[in-house]
Image (spheres, grey):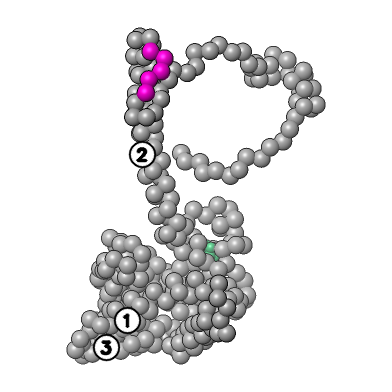
Amino acid sequence: MEKRAINFKELWTKNFKEILEKESFENLGDRKLYVGSSDIAGCLRKAYLQKMNNKEISIEQSITFERGHLAEDLVKKGFGNIPFKEQYEVKNDDGSFRSHIDFLIENKYEAIIVECKSLSSSVESPYESWVLQVQFQMALLAQEKKNKKISACIVALNVNNGWHEFFWIQPNTSLQKIAMKKAEELRDAIELQIEPKAEAQGYCGLCPFNSDCPLRLNGCTHINEALKEEAKEILTLNETTKVLNERLDSLKKSFVDKLNNLEIKKLSVDNKVLSLAGGITSTSLDINAWKQGNPQSYENVLKDFSKTTTRAKYLLIR
Ligand code: SF4
């Protein structure tokens, strides 16, 4: 490949990461200093480790996370003449719990939170984590807008195929209690520097702390959407192959019977040769019968003539 004086890819990667960090700091402040709505919406262990470590996010993860901002830009285009506030900050009295609402629409009587979510598929109902996040926001907003009716609208979009949906969420006292309890748990964990329990999420596959996650080491079954789609394709092909194989076996068996009856051993169709094979009697060692009938002799032979092989990993589908 032609060598260039400017390494554009390297420069782009460096600049891209720097601008994302700058934008994040300008919009959200130092996220290590408070518990935010996205922290409590998902796994507390991930949120805790993100705050305690300076673990660098890969460029692939950064690009993936940017989809959220793309969704916000798209939603903003539809506001028209509706007045709105962007990245509206709400917080509790001591500022330890904070959230930056994507968009806030309000008039004299009501305040509507608009949260944007980017997806690579479509959903019929909002994810629990989204609902918890806006419940947390509604609880904080209610402390500020005491006389207004508060509600939230989650706008979910798939920027790949244009699918979009609006999910309306009303304040729910029980869910707000859960959200606040999670926020307190995370705040305590940070103060005491004790890692909270891991909670499996759809994004575990993208989590930067998954390599040593106790839940995943114990066989966490949550995977990201892309991997889930691949798994679905394998299952569909596996099912199709199973049906085709059953049909092929049955056709072959009856064809063998027909060739036998007609005493035909070989025929040619479409430049392929079909011939009868097998029908030969052979004798082999019945290992199981030997093992059961004379275990000592089996053990002796195994000791002297055994060989160890490791089978390559394969996918078991049940
Ligand atoms: S891998 Fe999943 S469960 Fe483990 S810390 Fe990350 S998000 Fe939490």
Q: Position of residue 270 (x, y in %)?
A: 34, 29
Disc on the earlier residue, 3 or 1: 1
Q: Position of residue 70 (x, y in %)?
A: 35, 77
Residue ID for mark 2: 240
Secondary structure type for disc 3 = loop
Q: Amino acid at mark 2?
A: Thr
- Mark 2–mark 3 Cα distance, whole angstroms, equals 52 Å
Q: Contact (CB < 8 A) between labels 2 and 3?
A: no
What is the crowding at mark 3: few (fewer than 14 residues within 10 Å), some, or many (at least 20)?
some
**Nearest to viewer (mark 3 / mark 1):** 1
**Quarter occupied by residue 294:** top right
Say which residue appears at 42% left-offset and 53% top-offset. 230
Left-right relation of 167 to 120:
left
What is the crowding at mark 2: few (fewer than 14 residues within 10 Å), some, or many (at least 20)?
few
Task: In the rendered structure, find residue 84 and report the number of the disc placed on it.
Answer: 3
Q: Amino acid at mark 3?
A: Phe
Q: Which residues are magenta?
A: 264-268
Residue ID for mark 1: 73
